[in-house]
Amino acid sequence: IALNKKVFDAIHVFNQPIIHHVEPRTVDRYTSIAKARTAATKVGLTYDCEYLLFLDSDVVPPAWTLNALVATGHEVVGGWIPARRSAWIGGQWVKYGVFRHYREVQEGTICTDLISLGCTLVHRSLLEKYEFQGGHGFCIDEKGNTYQLSDSGAFSSYAIGAGHKLYLTSTVVCEHLI
């Protein structure tokens, strides 16, 4: 389980050991976060575990998050996290470069083109050869708003390209401290 600082003290909720915490330190936000995720992943993969759980320091998940994500049986599954622009982190590509964010939580467990690494369970097989990337490039939503692709966007593209499906489950709806 790879955790960031604010959830560090609340881990007793999940009743699981903390593997590692890495504090991002570089100036470029997305590159810094990507380096921290890569470092935490390398440590996490030294343990005999099937999955790593990523939780960002500004995301507060419900107490049942770990059990709910594991119960889906999916290799990449995350909780719903509100975005800064009145949408949710997750959605579908509708055409090249144009992305449709979900405007509300979708019921059940759904397949998505974007998952936030702010609250996501990932199978180790997907992480063993992956090094997290900073946010490179932009996309446009249907209203013409421009978004920078974060490390979550880069990871989502990699996972889909490697033949994995990404899922969001409505049993985990997080608070985003933004």
Image: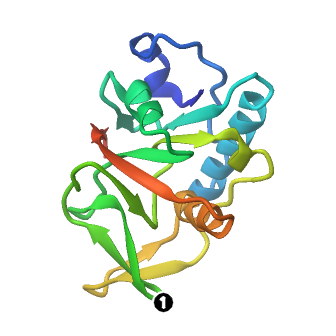
Report how many numbered discs are placed on residues in the image: 1
Residue at the location (80% across, 26% down)? 46
Instruction: Give the amino acid type for the residue marked by disc 1 in the picture.
Output: Tyr
Position of residue 125 in the picture relative to residue 67 (left or right): right
Along the viewing direction, whichever of 144 and 109 lies nearer the viewer:
109
The percent position of residue 114, horizontal first and vertical second, equals: 45, 63
Residue 72 appears anywhere in the view: yes
Where is residue 129? Give x, y as percent: 80, 51
Q: Does residue 28 show up?
A: no
Q: Identify the residue at image location x=51%, y=27%.
A: 5
Q: Quadrant of residue 39?
A: top right
Query: In this view of the protein, which residue sits in the foreground, 4 or 27?
Result: 4
Q: Is residue 151 above or below residue 108?
A: below
Q: Is residue 16 left or right of residue 26?
A: left
Residue highlighted by disc 1: 96
On screen, residue 146 above or below 129? below
**Quarter of the rendering containing residue 59:** top left
